[in-house]
């Protein structure tokens, strides 16, 4: 009886571990990328607060890495939060409700998605007008954002 119980306990543990290490399919990836840009928009506004920064970072895996190739930026979650907080305290966020980031195109891969996106402004007619286009690769671990690599 003890062997059966032990065997069943091991099976339950393995099943639970497999379920908790969920994959993030393309729809999941796009949803998380859109949530990331929405939260990033909130952080970049002149009205942003520490709570906006914490919300953005709550979308990330604890082991998230932010890399910006051009600027040689390499942040983990803690150092990225400090950088956001420094910019907030220096008043560097000055976007308005008219500023909006949108995803233009995506290319899915294994636990990654390449994203073409653009910052833009909503004009007086309510139409979004894109500015420059950018490229980023997002990686996922345990079904959560674990890598943002800017390639512009």
Image (spheres, rainbow, N blue to C red):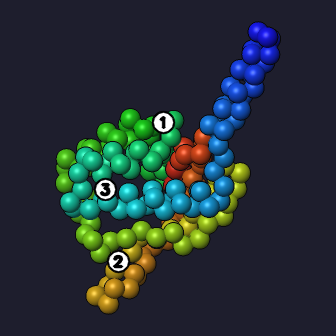
Q: Which mark is residue 48?
A: none
Q: What kind of element bears circle 2?
A: strand
Instruction: Please give the count of numbered marks on the rendered protein.
Output: 3
Image position of 150 (left or right of 23):
left
Q: Residue furthest bottom?
A: 125
**Residue pictured at 48% horizontal, 50% vertical:** 68
Q: Pointer 1: what residue?
A: 62
Distance of label 1 from label 2 (alpha carbons): 32 Å
**Which quadrant holds residue 39?**
bottom left
**Closer-to-camera residue (125/11):** 11
Count neighbours of disc 1 (C-alpha within 10 A) and say few if under 14, some if 14 to 19, many if 20 or more.
some
**Residue pictured at 68% horizontal, 25% vertical:** 13
Q: Pointer 2: what residue?
A: 121
**Closer-to-camera residue (65/12):** 12
Distance of label 3 from label 2 (alpha carbons): 16 Å
x and y percent of residue 135 in the render?
55, 63
Q: Which mark is residue 43?
A: 3
x and y percent of residue 53 in the render?
32, 48
**Residue pictured at 19% horizontal, 54% vertical:** 91
Q: What kind of element bears circle 3?
A: helix
Count neighbours of disc 3 (C-alpha within 10 A) and say few if under 14, some if 14 to 19, many if 20 or more.
many
């Amino acid at each position: 009886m003890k062997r059966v119980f032990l065997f069943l306990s091991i099976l339950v543990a393995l099943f639970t571990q497999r379920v908790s290490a969920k994959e993030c399919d393309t729809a999941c990836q796009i949803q998380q990328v859109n949530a990331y840009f929405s939260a990033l928009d909130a952080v970049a506004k002149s009205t942003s607060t520490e709570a906006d920064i914490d919300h953005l970072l709550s979308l990330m895996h604890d082991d998230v890495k932010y890399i910006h190739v051009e600027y040689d930026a390499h942040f983990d979650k803690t150092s990225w939060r400090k950088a956001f907080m420094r910019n907030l305290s220096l008043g560097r966020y000055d976007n308005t409700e008219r500023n909006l980031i949108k995803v233009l195109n995506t290319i899915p891969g294994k636990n990654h998605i390449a994203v073409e996106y653009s910052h833009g402004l909503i004009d007086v007619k309510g139409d979004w007008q894109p500015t420059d286009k950018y490229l980023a690769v997002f990686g996922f671990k345990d079904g959560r954002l674990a890598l943002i690599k800017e390639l512009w």
